[in-house]
Image (cartoon, rainbow, N blue to C red):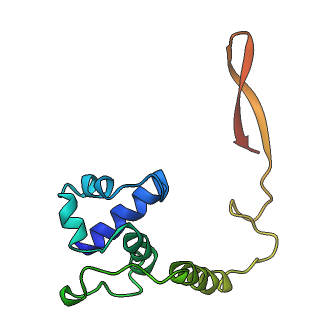
Amino acid sequence: MFPRLVSAAAETFIAHGFQRTQMQDVADVLGVAKGTVYGYVENKDALLGAAPRYADGVVPPPGVGQLPVPASAERESAALVAERLGNDLGDLRVVGGATALGSRPATRRHRCRSSHAGRPARAWTAA
């Protein structure tokens, strides 16, 4: 259940933002009562801290004796995210002139497909 909670929380925070997300929103995604969520995390701040800490599976989920997960110390979650991004970005490198689309540079052009109210609609395609 805890991995599902973390995944649902991450999706809800991304969709609605931290301020607008309520614990009930996460409970609704999971199909459980709000009180069930509080059995796993102390509050919304704890849920926000749990998302980057446990979502990728690098850190194993807490055991039953460690629940509910307390809120992270101030800036602890930000430091964790920065550390993880730093580790991942350190492994990236540019190879030759390759792009995400292949070995040739990406270019775009537009063409008319239909008109709406007398103006042509544009569809972007790779050259």
Q: Tell me the residue at 24%/69% (across/down).
A: 38
Q: Is residue 27 left or right of residue 82?
A: left
So how many labels did they put on this image?
0
> Picture coordinates of residue 73 (x, y %)?
47, 84
Asked where in the image residue 120 lies, by quadrant, the reply is top right
Asked where in the image residue 21 lies, by quadrant, the reply is bottom left
The quadrant of the image that shows the N terminus is bottom left
Q: Among all residues in the image, which is located at the extreme top?
A: 118
Please, is residue 6 above or below residue 68 in the view? above
Q: Nearer the viewer, residue 126 or 9?
A: 9
Q: Tell me the residue at 65%/85% (across/down).
A: 91
The quadrant of the image that shows the C terminus is top right
Q: Nearer the viewer, residue 64 or 107?
A: 64
Please, is residue 50 above or below residue 13 in the view? below
Q: Tell me the residue at 29%/67% (across/down).
A: 5
> Picture coordinates of residue 20 (x, y %)?
45, 51
Q: Nearer the viewer, residue 62 or 41?
A: 41
Q: Is residue 88 left or right of residue 30?
A: right
> Picture coordinates of residue 2 (x, y %)?
26, 74
Q: Tell me the residue at 59%/86% (across/down).
A: 83
